Amino acid sequence: MNEKRRIGYTCAYTPLALIHAAGFSPYRILPDVDCADRAGQVLHDNLCPHVKRVLDRAMAGSVPELAGAVFMNSCDAMRRLADAWAAVRRDVPAALVDLPVVVNDRTVSFFRDELERCAGILQSWGGVIMSDASIAEGVGTHNRIAERLERLRALAREGRLPGGFPALQEAYNLASTAPPEEAIARLDHIESGALAAPSGDGVPVFVFGNVLPEPEAFTLFEDAGARVVGEDLCTGSRLFARIDAAGPDPLRAIASSLLGRTACARTFDAEHPGGLAETVVTRAREFGARAVIAYTAKFCDPYIARMPAVRDALRTEGIPFLALEGDCTLRSIGQHRTRLEAFIEMMR
Amino acid sequence: MMHEFFSNLESGLSKAIGAGEASPRKIYARELARLGTRLYGGNGGVAWCGITAPFDLLNAMGVTSCFVEFVGAMLASTGVVGSFIEETDHMGYSSDACSYHRAVMGASRKGMVPEPAFLVGTTNPCSGGLAVIENLARRFGKRQYVLHIPQDQSGGNVRFLAEQLRDLSAFVAAHTGAPLDPDALRRAVSNTNEARALMAEAYEFAKAVPSPVATKDLANYGIVMALFLGTDAAVDIARAFRDEFAKRVADTRSGVPNEKVRLLWIQNRIQFKNGIDDILAREYDASVVIDELNDITWDAIDPDEPFEGIARRSISIPFNGSIANRVAHLKKLAREYRVHGAVNPCNWGCRQGTGARGLIEEGLKEIGVPVLNLEVDCIDSRKFTEGQFRTRIEAFMEMLAGRPSPWS
């Protein structure tokens, strides 16, 4: 059992490599634990259910012991979560790391400096003094996990991962919460069980959106007749993209890698406004998907605002599209069963 | 249609002002009408922006610029916003989005948003506003510049934003064909500083007990004045308010006769016609004496370092940064204005503003100032239920009447 102390986090842009480098174990506070709904005492009901359920967990004490929590300034809701955390969990120090919305030399430099500040905060929480070597080691740890998940993803796409995408989501959740060495060992074990021949059928679909950590959601997709062939979710592949730490300044390299990965709707190319729509079309085609399903938490402004353009682009390309909103509970996911079945049936 | 509306409004107000019926509010409204006339004049050169864009810099460069939320507020105040919001339903926009932003997107679909030359997005105050700028850039096929407003002034944050502002001036020059004239910027900074000083004086008068301010006097004032910064008009408007409040204080004339209850208004006003102001004034001798954004949170800008000064101002806006800072600012206002209570219209769809209302309520409670949280859509009048509001307000005012003033 790894005895590293944990650092809580909630966003796919979190610099996990730095947390590793500081000698901590990153622990994603997933919104998948049932506890009393108390966040409304602090935050308005119109706020993202992901954020509110994380806060519910914090208020209920249903998170493991943490040395600190790192929040990213990825959207209004996350910023408010950092505020609320500071108010309700004074025993667990929190840091808010600013995050640019567009990527250029200037913003990468700014984010690099934010990561340096974050490194200092981690050190002040009892982390080891970071050096280029320890940062490289942290990046290495992150990449070892990311590479394994990349292989599991490929197996899931090929239909060779026992349990398919629901099992892949379980692997993501494991990698998000377990100490790194334990996660690596268990991911290796999962990979060792790969099937020799593909299994599964159904209508190939590409799933994108934000927070969908429930493996049961993917089971629901499959039960409805879909075969997930790819996903772009912040509780999935987006979190575990590899980091390229090459270059003289490892912090800048991490900054560049984090900002350069497949973007959440909150990050965009100023020279290509609404580019998310084209990205979704491209990725659906890359994966050979016949349809696209969007799953987003309610009240998510970055996705709400971009979804009409995504819908238009998919319609233009003749790709059927189903947009689902939920509150990060199995209950709300289950309510979509009829819509999902009708959507898949339409393509049979 | 919009050009005609603003043009008629401007000429009507000019006539009234010329006939000796001038008031600060009329002078302010006339300038808004002039801005609307320019925006909808069809002459190009318009820039749609985020709320914390550097309007004095844009004004110095001859660009007619405005934040997109202006469109939603304007459509709401004229009572026609419903069909524009509905239009976004057909686009697949969720009804959970902010109605300011839904209104402007719907208006753009209906041809009621003039095509801009370019756009300027700002990360402060909200993700939704920034997304609208991106959507409009896509819709019109125009370039956008995005300003990342850091959360505070620590480290190299001011320098980072100042560098972006320099980049922005080059971006604007590439569109207008005219580089930034340092003398024009210096004049703009001078106007900004003069307006700032006059606004600060007006706010000082507003703190008097009883206050010279009636609920409607300074509605939307702080946020809208940002649009005129850098211009002579900003100075004229600010002077008009300063002079009027000075006179009222000298005459011991309060905004609400027999002022009994002083209120702080959090965030933005409700933009469509509603009866709240009248209920407060007529039934409770109450007045909103201070709005959250009616404050000067920034130092005068050094004309030799204009970009740094503008950067500090943008970062200092109370909606930026942590809620702890915002609560500290609200507490400061509550103390300075000796308010008895606060009203927080929790605009449905506004994550950044209403998101942490519980923390705001708790913070003001610490200094004995209760908060009335209203569930309201500040733009969409179709959702407004006056009876329910009246009940909430009555209960709040009765509660205030039954407790000692926090300042006695």
Image (cartoon, coloured by chain):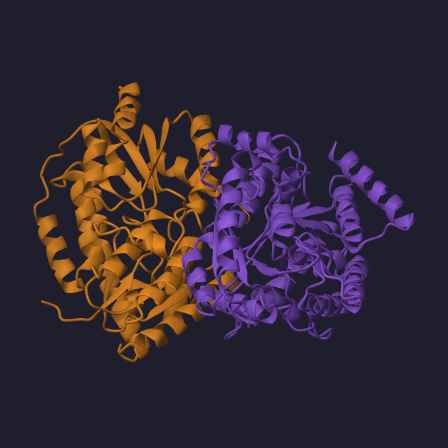
Please tell me which residue is depicted at 23% across the width and 56% down the height of the picture: A176
Q: Quadrant of residue A154?
A: top left
| Near-viewer residue (B172 or B382) | B382
Outermost residue to the right = B19
Tell me the quadrant of the picture where the N terminus of chain B can be found: top right
Q: Is residue B379 left or right of residue A182?
A: right
Q: Is residue B227 left or right of residue B99?
A: right
Q: Quadrant of residue A329?
A: top left
Please tell me which residue is depicted at 35% across the width and 75% down the height of the picture: A121
| Residue B340 spot, x, y in % from top left | 55, 63
| Residue A29 spot, x, y in % from top left | 26, 57
Residue B151 visible at all: no
| Residue B303 spot, x, y in % from top left | 74, 73
| Residue A128 spot, x, y in % from top left | 26, 78
Of all chains in the rendering, the one displayed in purple is B
Residue A188 visible at all: yes
Of all chains in the rendering, the one displayed in orange is A
Q: Is residue A202 above or below residue B52?
A: above
| Near-viewer residue (A333 or A40) | A40
Tell me the quadrant of the picture where the C terminus of chain B can be found: bottom right
| Near-viewer residue (A124 or B166) | A124
